[in-house]
Amino acid sequence: MQLDLFAAVLDEYLQSGSLSNESLYAHLGRAGAVQPAAFAQRTAIGASGEQHSPAKRRVRWIQQTLKAMGLIERIPQQRGVWRATTKAKADLTPAQPKVVLLGFHTELGIGIWGNAVDVLNRIDEPVSLFLTSPPYALRQPRAYGNPSQQAYVDFITSTLEPICRTLAPGGVVALNVSNDIFVEGSPERSTYREELVLAIKSRCGLALMDSLIWLNPCKPPGPIQWASKQRMQLGVAYEHVLYFTNDPHRCKADNRRILQPHTPAQRRLIDRGGENRTAVNADGAYRIRPGSYGNATAGSIQRNVLNVSHNCPSQRALRAKTDALGLPRHGAVMPLKLARLLVEFFCPPGELVVDPFAGSFTTARAAEDTGRRWICGDKHLEYVLLGQHRMQPAVA
């Protein structure tokens, strides 16, 4: 209970502003973090045998921990009244090395506060899908931190090594990585992505299945220097989703789970029994015969170019909640539609999805919505708190 309480106590201060201890106990009881009757229960504690409430003592221990972290403070001249600090609402609070705390849970999954490798080292059951958008290799780090281009390959492969030990046969590793990385001061594109693919194959023993293209029509213009000013590059409109497995012949991905609706033209062709002509295309490699493409199917196979806008209703709803709580927004989010498509394609229903760079917990939301179990974590406490809100009913 104490691990669950840590996030719940801070969340109450963020939402309520200031709270007396008795008000905090009442809020926690109504939220279901502690059974209300537990606060009234008393037992002998310590050598003196004095009667105390274990539940209240746990909450007060968390208060002192949050105070030491600079996240809450006492209100002067008000006994037992605390409030969230400016730091709690603006700065990011990283987890300490080797410390992994449970932030929240649902029937299908758990949200964890901890560093990626520490989270992954605690997983002891087969993982069917490792899906994440890790920090990009940026020269100017975001608030949540980014490795440099030079350190990026080692950063990713070191993170993957623990998951490779628990990846189920045919399990999938899928990484959303940036296409906008350039050699410093030059319009030359970095080869970090190619180096990463080779390192994952050699160090982690994973086979590259595909490099999916995420086409984002709402992507901001760029790269500014080389496309808008120097005019040497075209505007970037896509990112990669690198897709690996430990056993290509047993891979758990199945495109039948994400079949797309037939176009009206395809539907009409099927309805009339297929082609009624004979043709030879190119050098004879492709032939059309009467009846070609006439078999009724459940849908069209999804192409490996995923046209998904960054304009996401679910993320907009989360940003509104973030602002209402006065918490920092996450600077890089994945649209829920894309995460759902990837989760359904890569992972059979009921199996385990893992994301140690959860950010706004989009992978968790996608897994929850599609009936997959999940373990998602982030190194920053504020994002775990947002994830707790994200897992409440959200706009799809």
Image (cartoon, helix red, strand yellow):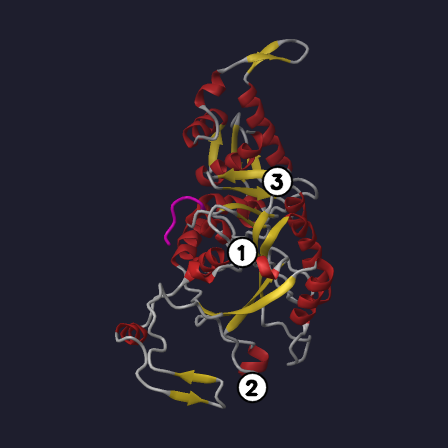
Front residue of this view, candidates 174 and 321: 174
At 56% across and 51% down in the image, what residue appears? 128
In the rendered image, residue 134, in percent from the top left (x then y), is placed at: 60, 58
Q: Is residue 33 above or below residue 230?
A: above
Q: Which residue is mark 2?
A: 231
Q: Residue placed farthest to the top in the image?
A: 49
In the image, residue 44 lies in the stretch drawn in magenta: no
| Amino acid type of the residue that numbered disc 1 sits on in the rendered structure | Lys
Q: Which residue is mark 3?
A: 70
Front residue of this view, candidates 139 and 18: 139
Q: Is residue 85 above or below residue 274?
A: above
Q: How far apart in space, not on screen, are marks 1 and 3 (Cα)?
A: 45 Å
Q: Quadrant of the C terminus?
A: bottom left
Neighbour class for label 2 at 10 Å: few (<14), some, many (≥20)? few
In the rendered image, residue 90, in percent from the top left (x then y), is placed at: 55, 50
In the rendered image, residue 344, in percent from the top left (x then y), is placed at: 46, 56
Read off the magenta span.
391-396
Give the label, 2 or 1, closer to the camera.
Answer: 1
Horizontal side of 33 relative to 195 (left or right) equals: left
